[in-house]
Amino acid sequence: MCREETTVIDRPAELSAFEFAVLAGLRATQLSRGCTPRVPGAAKVTIIAQMEVAARKVVRAPDARLAGEVL
């Protein structure tokens, strides 16, 4: 049998699994539309996006409502 090599990306501790998945998904969409990757390596956009989030090259924008600011 031939086994494919799997890549496991460790998510940052400050992100929940949901936040990590959403952020990586949004970044994967950007990459598939032609944005330049911020990390070298993998061929699949989903893996590149996860690697970028794990390396903290992509972060979520602060939410002004949580900071107490009035919009």
Image (spheres, rainbow, N blue to C red):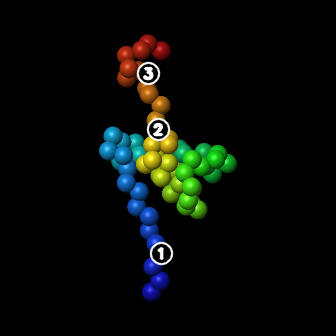
Residue 22 in sight in this render = no
Kind of residue sitting beneath label 3: Ala
Answer with left or right where residue 39 lies relative to residue 13.
Answer: right
The residue where tag 2 is placed is 59
Q: Residue at x 46, y 72 (%)?
A: 5
Image height check: is 7 above or below 45?
A: below
Find the distance from the CA under tag 1 to the CA under tag 2.
Answer: 30 Å
Answer with left or right where residue 69 lies relative to residue 29.
Answer: left
Q: Please report contact status of discs 1 and 2: CB closer than 8 Å, yes or no.
A: no
Find residue 23 and report its horizontal and vertical position in percent.
47, 43
Pick whichever of labels 1 and 2 is earlier in the sequence. 1
Find residue 69 and report its horizontal and vertical position in percent.
42, 14
Q: Residue at x 47, y 52 (%)?
A: 50
Q: Residue at x 37, y 54 (%)?
A: 10
Pick whichever of labels 2 and 3 is earlier in the sequence. 2
The residue where tag 3 is placed is 64
Which labelled disc corresponds to residue 4?
A: 1
Q: Dot 1: what SS? A: loop
